[in-house]
Image (tube, helix red, strand yellow):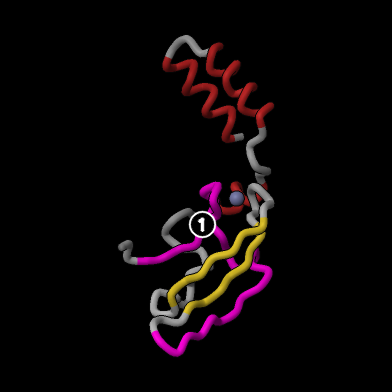
């Protein structure tokens, strides 16, 4: 069991508070109660739902972990759209053009700009 539970879509994308469309409690007389979360994944746009045991539910489960990304990285990633198939193909062709390590480093520098 990981130290911190997080919610993920089937596609692997992490679910944050902004993706949640509905939450509720599923109370049982016997056994653990659950927190119910309905979400729309920000990556694959599919609706999903998940039950989290109330004892594993914690404040911050839907919030960003500050140490995961620097604020600059976070801003950069938030501005980016999901990677589509055309970008994958482009990336493949770009990779084919690279012949030396210094070539690769030049391209990485360019990409940062
Ligand atoms: Zn998804």
* Percent coordinates x, y for residue 57 in the rendering: 44, 75
Work out which residue is located at the far bottom of the displayed protein and give it: 29
Q: Which residue is mark 1?
A: 8
* Percent coordinates x, y for residue 32 in the rendering: 40, 81
Q: Residue at x 65, y 54 (%)?
A: 42
**Relative side of 23 to 51, left or right:** right
Give whichever of 109, 47 is nearer the camera.
47
Residue 23 is one of the magenta-drawn residues: yes
Secondary structure category for the residue under label 1? loop
Quarter of the image containing the N terminus? bottom left
Q: Is residue 95 above or below residue 82?
A: above
Region rendered in magenta: 4-30
Give whichever of 106, 4 is nearer the camera.
4
**Relative side of 102 to 24, left or right:** left
Q: Is residue 109 above or below residue 28?
A: above
Q: Residue at x 39, y 79 (%)?
A: 55
Residue 22 is one of the magenta-drawn residues: yes
Give whichever of 49, 83 is nearer the camera.
49
**Relative side of 28 to 2, left or right:** right
* Percent coordinates x, y for residue 84 in the rendering: 66, 34
* Percent coordinates x, y for residue 24 in the rendering: 60, 79
Q: Is residue 64 above or below residue 104?
A: below
């Amino acid at each position: 069991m990981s130290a911190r539970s997080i919610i993920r879509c089937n596609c692997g994308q992490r679910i944050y508070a902004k993706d949640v469309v509905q939450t509720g409690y599923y109370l049982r007389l016997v056994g653990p109660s659950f927190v119910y979360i309905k979400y729309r994944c920000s990556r694959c746009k599919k609706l999903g739902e998940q039950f989290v045991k109330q004892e594993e539910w914690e404040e911050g489960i839907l919030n960003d972990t500050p140490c995961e990304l620097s604020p600059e990285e976070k801003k950069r990633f938030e501005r980016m759209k999901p990677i589509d198939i055309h970008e994958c193909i482009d990336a493949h062709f770009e990779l084919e053009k690279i012949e030396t390590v210094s070539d690769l480093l030049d391209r990485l520098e360019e990409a940062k700009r």
